[in-house]
Amino acid sequence: MTTPRRGSLREEQKRLTKARIVETARTLFETQGYSDVRVDDITAAVGCSRATFYLHFTSKGEVLRAIALDGTLASVLDFYADLDRVLALGSRESFADWMSRAIDWFFANKNMLPAWDEATALEPEFRAVAREGIMALADTMPVYLARWPEHRRDEARLRIELLVAQLERFFTRWAMQGTIEVSAEQAAAVLTDVWFPALQAPA
């Protein structure tokens, strides 16, 4: 029987502690927002010291960045990679289905949206992360970009970024603020009417 090395056990313990910090912080951000959560709140909920926290992260903003980059952003990138496939099909029905799934994705991540918005407003570093994330979405759509003339590729990217912005703003006003009254089905249909033609590459 092989006994695990002390070094490997220590590394595994560090990994688990970091994961607990991330998951605990996510729960706090979801329930309390970003600005109201302090490092002390995170360490108390995890049951670790501030020294342990700072062994893994330099700030609560870095924890939120880890949440975004390690989980949320990956799922968003997959979603827009699928949009690349959908647009290549040229099917309005497939696009409408994608739009319905996009609304479902926002519902699944609804509780984190206020924290992201707060962090983007308060933290210059997180604004840079948000910008990099939006730019990365277009990179997951090479087939779509290739259908545009090279001198209009920036316009193609802008259309994707505007789609992202409108979906985020619509969802905030509709599902979180309640200032837009519409069913998910109606919203998906109208958004499809707007965006399916808007995303078509020039002939």
Image: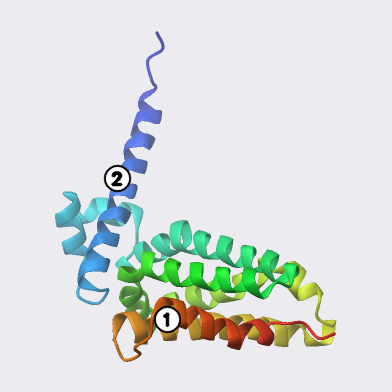
The quadrant in which residue 65 appears is bottom left
Report the front residue among 41 and 146: 146
Comparing 184 with 118, the one in front is: 184
Picture layout, residue 16 above or below residue 169: above
Give the image location of residue 24, x and y in percent: 25, 55
Q: CA distance from mark 1 to mark 2?
A: 27 Å
Disc with the residue nearer the chain's start (1 vs 2): 2
- Does residue 122 appear in the picture of this structure? no
Disc number placed over residue 139 in the picture, else none: none
| Element at label 2 | helix
x and y, in percent, of residue 53 in the image: 27, 55
Which color scheme did the rendering employ for the protein?
rainbow
Helix, strand or loop for disc 1: helix
Q: Amino acid at mark 1?
A: Pro
Picture coordinates of residue 125 (x, y %)?
44, 76
Q: Nearer the viewer, residue 60 or 67?
A: 67
* Residue furthest bottom in the image: 179
Identify the residue shown where x is 35% and y is 29%: 9
- Residue visible at 66% across and 66% down in the picture: 140
Total numbered circles: 2
- The quadrant in which the C terminus is found is bottom right
Seen at 63% across and 72% down, the residue is 93
Residue at mark 2:
17
Graded by Cα atoms within 10 Å as few (under 14), some (14 to 19) or many (20 or more), the crowding at tag 1 reads few
At label 2, counting other C-alpha atoms closer than 10 Å, the crowd grade (few under 14, some 14-19, many 20 or more) is: some
What residue sits right under mark 1 in the picture? 124
Q: Residue furthest top?
A: 1
Q: Please state which amino acid type lies under the numbered disc 2.
A: Thr
Residue 32 visible in the current orientation: yes
Quarter containing the N terminus: top left
Horizontally, is 72 left or right of 193 in the view? left
Q: Residue at x 59, y 88 (%)?
A: 194
